[in-house]
Image (spheres, grey):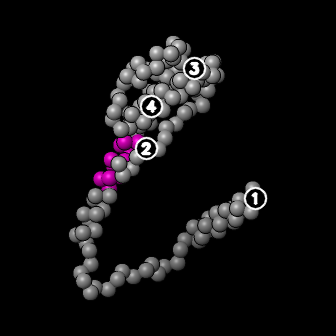
């Protein structure tokens, strides 16, 4: 795939629920969640229960936590897939427009922008440059 999903989000509002689980159950939950998130975006799995079947040692409290977290994975993955599709449509549209408006062979190249940049932009750019230099120098 040309644009694979590289991760998923774990939200802080799940933290109290995770703390209530024994460490072994947290490990099972996260492993199952990784399987679910990866299979979900690829279209290989659509129901959290499919993944839970693979984890018979997961206790009821961890299973409930998994279901809550899997619903967030579903929501976020759906958003990601829609953004990816719209990006692909934009790229295709830009490519089509580029083919239609390609300059004729031998025509002059487009001229560079001649008006001065917005002074607010220049100030923001300078402020950002100074901040990056401070961070690189070890001071914040």
| Residue at mark 2 to residue at mark 1: CA–CA distance | 33 Å
- Disc 3 packing (10 Å; few <14; some 14–19; many ≥20): some
Circle 1 residue: 138
| Residue at mark 3 to residue at mark 1: CA–CA distance | 40 Å
Label 2–label 4 contact, CB within 8 A: no
Circle 2 residue: 5
Circle 4 residue: 35
Foreground mark, 2 or 3, reads 3
Q: Is residue 73 above or below residue 66?
A: below
Is 49 displayed left or right of 59 in the figure? Answer: left
Which residue is found at the position 43% from the left and 44% from the top?
A: 5
- Of marks 3 and 4, which one's residue comes earlier in the chain? 3
| Residue at mark 3 to residue at mark 4: CA–CA distance | 15 Å
Circle 3 residue: 25
Which residue is found at the position 41% from the left and 18% from the top?
A: 53
Identify which residue, 40 or 69, lies in the foreground. 40
């Amino acid at each position: 795939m040309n644009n694979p999903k590289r991760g998923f989000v774990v939200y802080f509002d799940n933290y109290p629920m995770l703390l209530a689980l024994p460490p072994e159950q947290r490990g099972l939950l996260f492993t199952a969640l990784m399987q679910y998130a990866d299979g979900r975006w690829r279209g290989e799995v659509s129901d959290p229960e499919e993944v839970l079947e693979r984890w018979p040692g997961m206790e009821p409290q961890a299973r409930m936590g998994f279901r809550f977290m899997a619903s967030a994975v579903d929501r976020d993955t759906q958003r990601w897939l829609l953004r990816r599709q719209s990006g692909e449509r934009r790229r295709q549209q830009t490519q089509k427009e580029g083919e239609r408006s390609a300059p004729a062979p031998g025509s002059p190249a487009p001229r560079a922008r001649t008006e001065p940049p917005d002074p607010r932009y220049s100030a923001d750019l300078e402020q950002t440059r100074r901040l990056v230099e401070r961070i690189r120098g070890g001071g914040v």
